Image (cartoon, grey):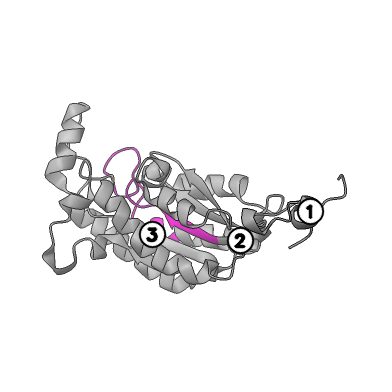
């Protein structure tokens, strides 16, 4: 038994702020992606509430490096910008934001995660009246504006193109054709149930081709030889 080869699960890593951290909650977009990839791939939540791209750039080498299982990573989502665009202590200047995204991509490439495995997710729009209520309830003034979030979204889109990464532009998609995007937001910033479904649907369309060839790991139970389960369960796939 001691000579058995350890099964290395492929990984999709979700790297982002609170919108990523909360994605494993009930009906969350990360949970839906994980459900689709059960028995094929681990979906790893590396979301950090309140973080911006500057802090993300600093911590990434502690999360994915040459000593970790970076060789098993099939995709990484990079989802920052909502906090960068805030006008409070979380703020990162617009000119610095794309440089941080580029640095994240360079680090990933340096440990074997190439740009074609990276999906940038641009921040969603802000429904200011809803978010202002949230701010007031916490004793502060409105600290995010939709137009500013749009500037960071545009910078994210441009940076993805420069880096050779894919882009999921939520700010644009959620406002397409002048639709009421408030249905996608629970509090004006974070995602509602419909917002999570929206992100999961669009992200899966981008992930599906990357994971299409991943095998079902370990045999389906009906395919196990009940008389000699070792022959089914302990052989290399």
Q: Residue 215's x, y, as percent? A: 62, 65
Quadrant in which residue 211 is drawn: bottom right
Q: Is residue 42 left or right of residue 24?
A: right
Asked if residue 96 lies in the magenta stretch, the reply is yes
- Of the numbered discs in the image, which one, if any, rests on residue 150? none
- Of the numbered discs in the image, which one, if any, rests on residue 234? 1
> Depth-wise, is mark 3 or mark 1 nearer the camera?
1
Q: Nearer the viewer, residue 235 or 173?
A: 235
Looking at the image, is mark 2 or mark 3 earlier in the sequence? 3
| Element type where label 2 sits in the image | loop
- Of the numbered discs in the image, which one, if any, rests on residue 216? 2
Looking at the image, is mark 2 or mark 1 earlier in the sequence? 2
Looking at the image, is mark 3 or mark 1 earlier in the sequence? 3
Q: Quadrant of the C terminus?
A: bottom right
- Residue labelled with disc 3: 121
Q: Nearer the viewer, residue 112 or 193?
A: 193
> Residue at the spot x=18%, y=62% of the render?
175
Q: Is residue 137 left or right of residue 152?
A: left
Q: Report crowding for label 3: few under 14, some 14 to 19, many 20 or more residues within 10 A (C-alpha).
A: many
In whole angstroms, how far apart are the C-alphas of marks 3 and 1?
40 Å
**Does the residue at mark 2 contact the one at mark 1 (Cβ under 8 Å)?**
no
In whole angstroms, how far apart are the C-alphas of marks 2 and 1?
15 Å
Whether residue 220 appears in this view of the structure is no
Q: Report crowding for label 2: few under 14, some 14 to 19, many 20 or more residues within 10 A (C-alpha).
A: few
In whole angstroms, how far apart are the C-alphas of marks 2 and 3?
28 Å
**Does the residue at mark 2 contact the one at mark 3 (Cβ under 8 Å)?**
no
Whether residue 205 appears in this view of the structure is yes
Q: Is residue 43 left or right of residue 87?
A: right
Q: Is residue 118 left or right of residue 97?
A: right
Q: Nearer the viewer, residue 76 or 183?
A: 183
> Residue at the spot x=41%, y=52% of the render?
32
Residues rendered magenta in the picture? 75-99
């Amino acid at each position: 038994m001691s000579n058995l080869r350890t099964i290395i699960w492929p990984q999709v890593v979700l790297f982002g702020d609170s919108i990523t951290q909360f994605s494993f909650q009930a009906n969350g977009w990360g949970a839906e992606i994980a459900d689709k990839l059960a028995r094929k791939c681990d979906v790893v939540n590396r979301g950090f509430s309140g973080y911006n791209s500057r802090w993300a750039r600093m911590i990434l080498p502690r999360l994915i490096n040459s000593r970790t299982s970076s060789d098993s990573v099939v995709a990484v989502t990079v989802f920052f910008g909502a906090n960068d665009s805030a006008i409070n202590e979380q703020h990162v200047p617009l000119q610095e934001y794309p440089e941080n995204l580029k640095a994240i991509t360079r680090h990933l490439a340096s440990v074997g995660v190439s740009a074609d495995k990276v999906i940038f997710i641009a921040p969603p729009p802000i429904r200011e009246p809803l978010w202002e209520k949230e701010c007031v309830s916490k004793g502060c003034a409105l600290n995010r504006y939709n137009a500013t979030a749009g500037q960071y979204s545009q910078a994210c889109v441009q940076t993805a193109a420069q880096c050779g990464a894919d882009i999921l532009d939520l700010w644009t998609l959620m406002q397409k054709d002048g639709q009421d995007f408030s249905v996608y937001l629970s509090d004006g910033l974070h995602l509602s149930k419909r917002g999570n479904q929206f992100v999961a649907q669009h992200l899966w369309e981008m992930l599906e081709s990357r994971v299409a060839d991943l095998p079902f790991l370990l045999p389906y139970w009906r395919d196990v030889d009940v008389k000699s389960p070792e022959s089914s369960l302990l052989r290399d796939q």
